[in-house]
Amino acid sequence: MATAGVQEVRVPPLTSTSEPPSLFDGTTRLYISYICPYAQRVWITRNYKGLQDKIKLVPIDLQNRPAWYKEKVYPENKVPSLEHNGKVLGESLDLVKYIDDNFEGPSLVPSDPAKKEFGEELISHVDTFTKELYSALKGDPIHQAGPAFDYLENALGKFGDGPFFLGQFSWVDIAYVPFVERFQLVFADVFKHDITEGRPKLATWIEEVNKISAYTQTRADPKEIVDLFKKRFLAQQ
């Protein structure tokens, strides 16, 4: 799965003037935003399991979203959501698990009980991790974000059979990588700080994840990410 794949053409996102697709016609659709880290998790999952022909990607413009999306598809009006078998499901980590359980392709949850248990522990921590990073932007970012990145460095040392959290690439890597991607870019650009400094396992992990085309095909434009962070989180500074 780590070999370079054919880059999927990114179709323009649907906007308030776009007609809806033929909803509930038997097509499985994954509604995403190209810039959303939560949607990116499910997009990576789809790609890694080789489901590009089974799950149609439907990008939405979150700044100018179509009214029919809330009315007819997903009342929460968020991404990601998955239209499958006549129903629509949401919440990124639930969808990662749902796709892993209900579609063909390599499993994203290891069968080893110790790894499975540690995986659940890491997944239960991911929201705390992201909150710590976003909070750090309001104070002394480099100092305050340190413990969050140290947590990853320590977690990556748990198993010695691969560069990923559970040895092999899994849903844990998928849960964390969109946020590490964004904060690595922002810390380098805005604060001139390398988040992998003194964290060799994190450096290796980032290097190895970037060899997986299922992930690299979902990466957002770095400039767009940095500009969005500056506008949304750093405007007051």
Image (spheres, rainbow, N blue to C red):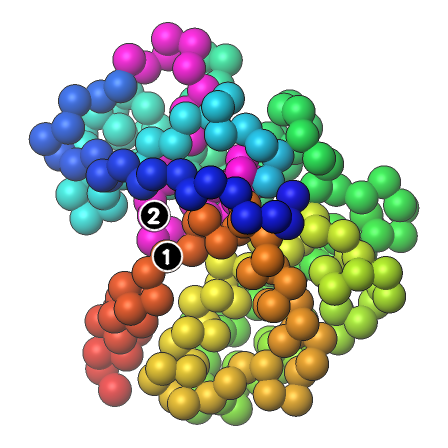
Q: CA distance from mark 1 to mark 2?
A: 7 Å
The foreground one among 57 and 2 is 2
Against 123, residue 15 (above or below) is: above
| Residue 34, label in figure | 2
Please give the residue where the numbered disc 1 appears in the rendered image. 220
Percent across and percent down for residue 156 are: 75, 68
For the image, the number of numbered tags is 2
* Residue shown at the point (63%, 76%) measured from the top left: 203
Tags 1 and 2 in contact by the CB under 8 Å rule?
yes
Q: Position of residue 139 (x, y in %)?
A: 40, 87
Q: Considering the image in quadrants, where does the N terminus appear?
A: top right
In the rendered image, the quadrant that contains the C terminus is bottom left
Which residue is rendered at x = 47% and y = 74% of the image?
184
Residue depicted at 26% across the width and 75% down the height: 230
Which numbered tag is attached to residue 17? none
Image side of residue 184 versus residue 32, left or right: right
Dot 1 falls on a residue whose secondary structure is: loop
Q: Is residue 74 above or below residue 135?
A: above
Residue 228 point in image, percent of width and height: 27, 66
- Residue 204 visible: yes
Q: Amino acid at mark 1?
A: Ala
Query: Is residue 124 visible to us here?
Result: no
Q: In x, y percent, where is residue 174?
A: 59, 51
Q: Residues within 10 Å of mark 1 (few under 14, many from 20)?
A: some
> What stretch of residues is rendered in magenta?
22-47
Magenta region includes residue 137: no
198 lies above or below 210: below
Which quarter of the picture shows residue 233? bottom left
Is 169 situated left or right of 146 in this image?
right
Q: Residue furthest right?
A: 113
- Tell me the kind of residue under disc 2: Tyr
Q: Residue furthest top?
A: 25
